[in-house]
C-alpha cells in the first residue's frame, strides 16, 4: 500500500523508532525523523531513501523541552504538514529503590514522561493549526504494575498512559485521533539486559503490528494484542509475592 501521509517519529535512530521508520517507509509514507545524533539520522535517511516517499531529519533531544515545538513546526513546513506524530523516544534503566540511582530516575522522568508529554502537547497544538492529525503515544505493559527494580519506568509509562487518555477525552469533538500502544517484550536493546522477556517478538514483527494498528486508528492496544490482552488482565491481579519474582 502506498500513501502520501507524513509521519514524525521521535527517537527514530534506535530500537522501536528505527524499526517503525522502516515499516512506514515500506508503506510509502513521507518521514520526519528526529533523534539526538545527526550522524545517526543521516545514516538512517540514506537507508530509507529508496523506499520512503520523502525523508527529512532534525536533531532533537526531547529533554530540551523548549526546542520540541520549533523542531516539529520545521518538520511540518518541510513536509507540508504532519498527519501522524509518534511519541516514541524513551529510556529504560534498572533502578532498584534506595540504591542511589536518582540521576537515572530523573533522566527517565525527563525523557519518558516530561519529554513525551511536551512532544504530545506540541503535536496537539500543530494539529489544531492545520485542522487535524493523529497522535500516537508508546506506553508499555509495564504501566500496569510497579515492576520491581524498574519502578520508575513503570511510573513514567503509567503517567503517560493517563495523560493520553485525558487528551483523547479532551479532543473527542476535534479532528484529532489519539492512539496509545502498549508493547510487551519486543526485541530491542532497550530490554535485552532483562533476565526474563516473556512472549518476546522480533522488532520487525512488533513494529509491523504497531503500524497496522496506527493505520486502523485504534484508541488503545497491547502489542502484540495476543497474548498481552489476556496477560494484562492477569497481571493486574497478580499477588505482590509473585510479582516480586519477575
Image (tube, grey):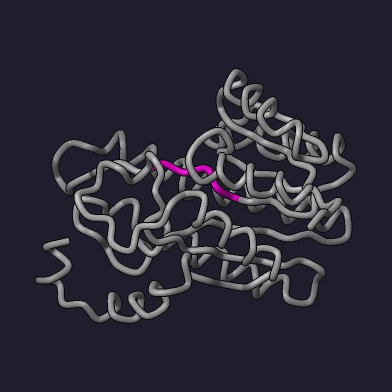
Q: Is residue 34 magenta?
A: no
- Residue 164 in percent (x, y) is at 57, 65
Identity of the residue furthest to the top in this view: 39
Q: Which residues are magenta?
A: 87-91
Compare residues 120 and 15 and report the one nearer the observer: 15
Q: At x 82% / y 69%, what residue is drawn?
A: 175
Quadrant of the snapshot with the C terminus: bottom left
- Residue 29 in percent (x, y) is at 77, 48
Residue 62 is left or right of residue 216, and the answer is left
Quadrant of the snapshot with the N terminus: bottom right
Compare residues 240 and 105 and report the one nearer the observer: 240
Q: In the rendered image of this protein, does residue 209 appear above or below residue 119?
A: below
Q: At x 63% / y 42%, what residue is drawn?
A: 22
- Residue 54 in percent (x, y) is at 81, 36
Q: At x 80% / y 71%, what residue is drawn?
A: 174
Q: Is residue 89 magenta?
A: yes
Amino acid at each position: 500500500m502506498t500513501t502520501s501521509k507524513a509521519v514524525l517519529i521521535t527517537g527514530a535512530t534506535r530500537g522501536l523508532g528505527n524499526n517503525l521508520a522502516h515499516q512506514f517507509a515500506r508503506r510509502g509514507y513521507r518521514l520526519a525523523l528526529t533523534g539526538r545524533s545527526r550522524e545517526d539520522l543521516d545514516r538512517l535517511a540514506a537507508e530509507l531513501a529508496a523506499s520512503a516517499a520523502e525523508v527529512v531529519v532534525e536533531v532533537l533531544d526531547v529533554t530540551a523541552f523548549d526546542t520540541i515545538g520549533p523542531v516539529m513546526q520545521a518538520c511540518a513546513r518541510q513536509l507540508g504538514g504532519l498527519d501522524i506524530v509518534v511519541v516514541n523516544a524513551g529510556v529504560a534503566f534498572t533502578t532498584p529503590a534506595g540504591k542511589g540511582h536518582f540521576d537515572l530516575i530523573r533522566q527517565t522522568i525527563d525523557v519518558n514522561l516530561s519529554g513525551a508529554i511536551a512532544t504530545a502537547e506540541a503535536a496537539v497544538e500543530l494539529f489544531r493549526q492545520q485542522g487535524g492529525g493523529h497522535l500516537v503515544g508508546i506506553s508499555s505493559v509495564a504501566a500496569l504494575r510497579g515492576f520491581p527494580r524498574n519502578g520508575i519506568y513503570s511510573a513514567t509509562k503509567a503517567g503517560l498512559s493517563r495523560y493520553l487518555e485525558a487528551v483523547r477525552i479532551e479532543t473527542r469533538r476535534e479532528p484529532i485521533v489519539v492512539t496509545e500502544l502498549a508493547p510487551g517484550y519486543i526485541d530491542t536493546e532497550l530490554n535485552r539486559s532483562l533476565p526474563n522477556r516473556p512472549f518476546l517478538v522480533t522488532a520487525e514483527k512488533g513494529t509491523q503490528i504497531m503500524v497496522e494498528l496506527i493505520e486502523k486508528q485504534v484508541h488503545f492496544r497491547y502489542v502484540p494484542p495476543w497474548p498481552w490482552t489476556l496477560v494484562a488482565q492477569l497481571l493486574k491481579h497478580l499477588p505482590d509475592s509473585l510479582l516480586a519474582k519477575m
